[in-house]
Amino acid sequence: MKASARLVVSLDSHGNSVVRVLRSQSPLTLVPHRRVGPVALVHLVSSVTAPLGGDCLSLTVEVGPGASLDLRGVAATLLLPGSSGTSSSSVVRFLVEGSVRYLPEPTVVTGRANHTAVVEAELDGHAELRTREILVLGRTRESPGALSTSVRATRCGKPLLHQQLVVGSPSLDASTAGLAGKRVVGTELMLDAVARVSDGGEWWSVVPLAAGGTLATALGDDVVTVTNVLDAI
Amino acid sequence: MLTALILADSRFPGGGHVHSGGLEEAAARGLVVDEPSLQSFLYGRLLTTGLLAAGFAAAAARGEDLAVLDAELDARTPSPAQREASRAQGRGMLRAARRAWPSARLSSLAASPHQPLVIGVLVDDPYEAALTCAYLSVSGPASAAVRLLGLDPFGVNAIVAALPVEDVASRAVKELPCLGSPALDLLAEAHVRREGVRLFGS
């Protein structure tokens, strides 16, 4: 299944963030809320079981100057294999002049999944982006399939963060210098002008990026532990 | 080739011996205790941060813009402790290199450059630069393990010799990697927060 969806939010003359373009294509179904206010709320609903092997999904989100968007998932994403054995992919692209919060639910990498996920964000001078990713390596007592997930964020063309994480190589997942045998990996990227105090514990940290912004990272054995760390920031 | 050998030699006075690449923190937590756990640590380090560093050394050796590479490597190193460790080792290597191999391109590096960029400028063959960088990503931590854990130097040397350093260097010359290692980042951050005696800078 190939699908592309597009969402455009801009500020109207009353100071409200308004959804100007909403193009869903199953399984990428965008559900806007009717409330009118400074922040537009849209839920991203997977209206078909996806992604399966062979699926190719693409979502583009544009937020204009002064506008704010809250884009939320409603359920965890299960990465599943298809019948053909081919890989699946998803690309989410943000073009931000205003402010975006992107909070999908956790992604579970099931046994024979083979998926590539890409997030690309282009921010202009004062744009803000906050996004969270929580990965679960396999269902209970299941080894994960293969996942490559990457994020590249730039501000005015200059790189802020470019990270790829590869899951599904048993020797690398178990290595103390890989994922240290933890089942859940969480990151929260905050690209804004807020100065946050660096902090950390045994398996989590909140750190400033070199060119502005903050990254929180947590490793844990379950989603609740990792979510609690990220929620506390 | 000779430059690569000198840079990879543990007697090169670049200050690399004060960095353990996260090994000291891992050993302090009891995560690396013996040869099998060291092998796993070094393998993970080589295939994540080792590949990343080797890719940037190769790009610098190809003559790519050093300021662009510096910013791109910063963006791929979210941990400030890891950035500082890379720049401290770059600074130390640069100091020794200015005496040994003065050149205009070496002078064009920033005062505290990332170490892979210094290696790339000095070793102008991309594969050799990548190989040097990939090897250094594991040789320092391996030697730290001998010192910290009292492991058998012959056993540790055999582990290093069996690691796929050449495969990683071959991959590194093909594209600029962006692989992260969340656990190494967290170990590096915890290491700088650790109170009490630390033998290594990272």
Image: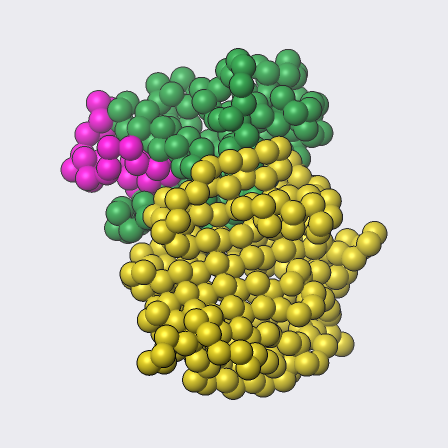
Residue B159 shows up from this direction: no
Along the line of sight, the residue nearer the viewer: A56 or A71: A71
On screen, B40 above or below A24? above
On screen, B88 above or below B48? above
Say which chain is yellow. A
On screen, B143 above or below B72? above
State the image coordinates of residue A231 (x, y, percent, origin top left): 60, 50
Residue A10 on the magenta segment: no
Along the line of sight, the residue nearer the viewer: B145 or B80: B80
Look at the image and give the residue range highlighted in magenta.
B98-124
What colour scheme has been applied to the protein in the rendered image?
A: by chain
Name the side, left or right, on which B119 lies relative to A32: left
Q: Residue at x 59, y 33 (%)?
A: A201
State the image coordinates of residue A143 (x, y, percent, origin top left): 77, 53
On screen, A38 above or below B96? below
Q: Residue at x 45, y 65 (%)?
A: A100
Residue extending furthest toward the right: A141
Q: How many marks?
A: 0
Residue B81 shows up from this direction: yes
Quadrant for residue A104, please give it: bottom right
Quadrant of image for the N terminus of chain B: top left
State the image coordinates of residue B41 (x, y, percent, origin top left): 62, 33
State the image coordinates of residue B176 (x, y, percent, origin top left): 42, 53
Say which chain is green. B
Along the line of sight, the residue nearer the viewer: A40 or A76: A40
Quadrant for residue A80, please give it: bottom right
Residue B104 on the magenta segment: yes
Along the line of sight, the residue nearer the viewer: B38 or B191: B191
Q: Residue at x 42, y 55 (%)?
A: A191
